[in-house]
Each structure stands twice: as C-alpha cells, then as structure tokens.
Amino acid sequence: MSAGSPDKAAIAKANGYTHVIDYRAEDFVARVKEITGSRGCDVVYDSVGKDTWRGSLKCLKKRGMFVSFGQSSGAITDFKIGDLAAGGSLYACRPTLFDFIITAEDLQARAAELFARLASGAVQAHVGQRFALRDAAKAHEALAARSTVGATVLLP
C-alpha cells in the first residue's frame, strides 16, 4: 500500500497493511520490486493520478492490470496506449462509481452490502476529520489540498 504522508502511512499500518510505502519519501517502484522479489504486482490501484501513474505501470508484472480510480494529484494527460505495450502487454481501466449504481436498485444493493460489512467490522472506516455542514467549502478546500486523512464527514 502506498501513502502520501507519514500520517497516512501510520493509519495504513494500524489497519493491518504489511507493507506501506510513503511514495513521496521513497522510490515506490524500487520498494515494490524489493517486496515482490522483482516479480511486480498483478494489479495496481492508483488513486493519485498524474504524480504516480508512470511508476504504477512500472510496478506491474507482464500482463498486469493498472486501475486508475482517482486523480488527487491531477488528471493523467500524457498517457499513450503504447505505454501498456512497453510495460509488458499491460491492461488499464478507469472505473467510475456511476457505472456500478446505474439504477436505484444497484445503489441500494451496494449500499446495503457496504453497511453490512461496516456493521460486522469486516470493513472499518477511519474518520479523520469532521466539518460542520456550513463549513462544506472548507472541507472541499482541505480535500483539494490533500490535507485530509481518512474519511471526511460533514455534520448538519
């Protein structure tokens, strides 16, 4: 698991991750190669985007899957299909939430599954900060500045 700060890395460790890499403080590609014995990963889930996508591709083994699901550092703008071939016949996808909750029934089923997992303790949510609803703009500023850790909750 990679994180962008010591605080975020500490939360990941506290939640059971065996290997946590602060990608801003160390060469995450080299660490992944070390951890995997130079084999690389089957799948990389990248929520950062612009700052990490090239390295994420380098962390994959041949025919690995790159899943881009966020862009906290900015959008990936210079990706070329040839990047996948150069990495060893890699795959890439960009899932979006709205394709998984097309109908009200889809949304209700997925929400019910998530809340059941939260209730059972199988999934735990770390609430890092709370804002009054009237301070929603401040919450958005904190999210955009990448200064949040865990979930951000707005309180009415």
Image: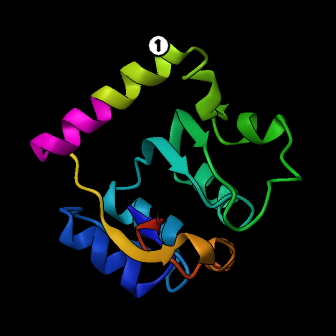
Query: Is 86 left or right of 58, judged from the image as shown?
Result: right
Residue 114 magenta-drawn?
yes
Label 1 neighbourhood size at 10 Å, few (<14), some (14-19), many (20+)?
A: few
Q: Residue at x 89, y 52 (%)?
A: 78
Residue at 42% x, 60% y is 33
Residue 14 is situated, as x and y percent measured from the top left of the image, at 19, 72
The answer to whether residue 30 is visible is: yes
Residue 90 in sight here = no
Seen from the viewer's position, the closer of residues 134 and 21 is 134
Residue 46 place in picture, x, y as percent:
57, 52
Question: Would you say residue 152 sits in the magenta stretch?
Answer: no
The residue that appears at 66% across and 64% down in the rendered structure is: 72
Instruction: Tell which residue pokes out farthest to the left in this image.
Output: 120
In this image, 53 relative to 113: left or right? Answer: right
Answer left or right for 31 relative to 135. Answer: left
Residue that numbered label 1 is attached to: 105
Quick one: quadrant of the N terminus? bottom left
Q: Percent position (x, y) of residue 68?
A: 63, 44
Q: Nearer the viewer, residue 9 or 107?
A: 107
Span highlighted in magenta in the image: 113-122
Q: Quadrant location of residue 115? A: top left
Report which quarter residue 81 is drawn in: top right
